[in-house]
Amino acid sequence: MNTIKEVYTFAAKGKRYMFWSVFLQGASSILGILPYYASYRIIAKLFNHSGSALFFLEMALLILIGMTMKTILGELGLKVSHQLAYETLAGMRKYAANQLLRMSLGTTEKRGSASLKKVFVENIEEMEVVLAHGLPEGLGNIIGLTITVLAIFVLDWRMALVSLAVMPIGYIAIILMSMNSKKKLEEFYNASRNMNNTIIEFVRGMKEIKVFGQGDNAFARYKKSVEEYKDYSLNWYKTSWKYMSFYEVVLPTTLLFLLPAGILFYSDGSLSLAAFIACVMLALSIGPMLIRVVFFIPLIPNLEQKFKPIKQLFSEQVLKEKNDLYLVPRQYDVEFDSVIFGYGKQSVLNNVSFCAKQGSVTAIVGKSGAGKSTVAKLLCRFWDVDKGTIRIGGQDLRDIPFQSLMEIVSFVAQDNFLFDMSIMDNIRLGRPDATDEEVIAVAKAARCDDFIQELPKGYATLAGEAGGKLSGGQRQRITIARAILKDSPIVILDEATSSTDAENEDLIQEALNHLLHGKTVLVIAHRLSTIVEASRIVVIKEGEIYGQGTHNDLLNSCDEYRHMWEKYNTTANWGYNADSSAQEVVHNA
């Protein structure tokens, strides 16, 4: 019951809708008795060779009214229950989306996209049957069934008891079928979740699977998950079908017990013919209602199991934030003060301290895995630090309202995501009220305009799912254009030029240097040539700072940076020589 109350809190008028859906379904079930009652009156009159034409007309009209009103009220009840169900599902999805926005990136990455997709799409959608049918139709038919049995009790208590004789038999079958159902449901959902994760991994990793010749291994994992899901489903069905078949055969057979008992009571004179006929007619309505009760009511306990993964998402820890507008910074210096952070037990940053002055460019360099990108993500508050403090304009990052933080910080990552909408709209996400001319201007600044104009529909061309219709370098430049349009006072470039070709890299650097003037810029770079002009370069090794200063300062004072610079130049020269050799080979050919 607590789960039901909790679920309906996601609908604006949950309790009211629930009451009316059950009331209408109950009224529909009760009105469904009228045709049986009218039929009893007709048969009784025929046995007595009495009844006028007007009487039979009235009874026929009563049958028509009963059937019509049963249908109308039943449909109205379903309409209300479906309204309730879909408002509840919509409320859950909105709450889940809001919860996802407030969760740390670490939590979402730990859960995985397949798990989150299952909650948003499948787990929430699976509740529709319970909410739209299980509760209103199950409870509504219980009301109708109760009224019918009470009516038979009024006629003859013995016949009422006989009419209920099939119920224990049917419910024994239900109890047997429901044994260990909670455990079986958990196993079934785990198998389903595992299959979904494997399928998504199989599809998304198809390129790597083919390139590295892992088709057999990947398909074996995929096949195993599908087989496990099939086995759980079939085993559950095999243990349930015999009980299902049994109660579906037994429950409608009320007359099998009622007729012999009625004949016996009628023959000894303890039951009148009229009462006998009435009991038989009313008993005819018991079977269909019992079937609906038995079908829908067991769905209600499953609500808890279906709601469990949704509730787990809702109960995930979210980033705490303050909504005090006075805490929004007016200055945009960025300061890391003795920051310690790790992913679980894995330490990533240890006592990191540096300051990025407003209006300057600060570069973070280091080998792969040193913690460079983690610095950028912590500034966006994708996670909270374990110890220490990050400040913007002197304000603790944790005290700045999250929405305000997102407005003052732009982030361009090395992995770029575009939505399946037009190029124009993808860039305009940076500032939704921007004009077409402003979008085109920043696209030109980010050196996107030329390739966009060559697309089939220009700026109206759809980017495809996750920007799949564009190359990595093209996606990179569009996200840079988006950040330029947003015009935030703090800009983070996480290896933002890593996917650009050599021809365009200098042009993009010129555009960034011009358009990011006066902003606090944090650059995560692996191409050292792109950050030699930075105001400050912070060298990170194994999560610790090994040096800070300008390019020339670090060449003289930091061995780690000097080795990185020498290695970078050696690699760059090797690449140049390789290109020259290739050109010579082509020329000679």
Image (cartoon, grey):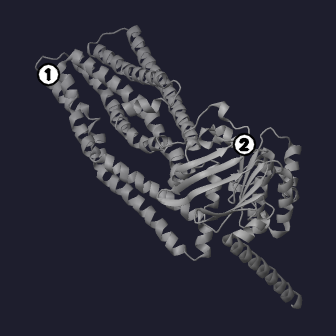
- Residue 22 against residue 558 in the figure, above or below: above
Q: Is residue 422 visible?
A: no
Q: Quadrant of the C terminus?
A: bottom right
| Residue appearing at x 51%, y 70% in the figure | 218
Residue nearest the viewer, comparing 555 with 243: 555
Question: Which residue is most to the front?
Answer: 557
In the picture, measured across the screen, residue 450 lies left or right of residue 183, that is right
In the picture, measured across the screen, residue 107 lies left or right of residue 432, that is left
Q: Name the element at disc 2.
A: helix
Residue nearest the viewer, comparing 205 with 104: 104
Residue receiving disc 2 = 408
Q: Name the element at disc 1.
A: helix
Q: Amino acid at mark 2?
A: Ile
Residue nearest the viewer, comparing 496 with 246: 496
In the picture, measured across the screen, residue 435 lies left or right of residue 242, that is right
Q: Amino acid at mark 1?
A: Phe
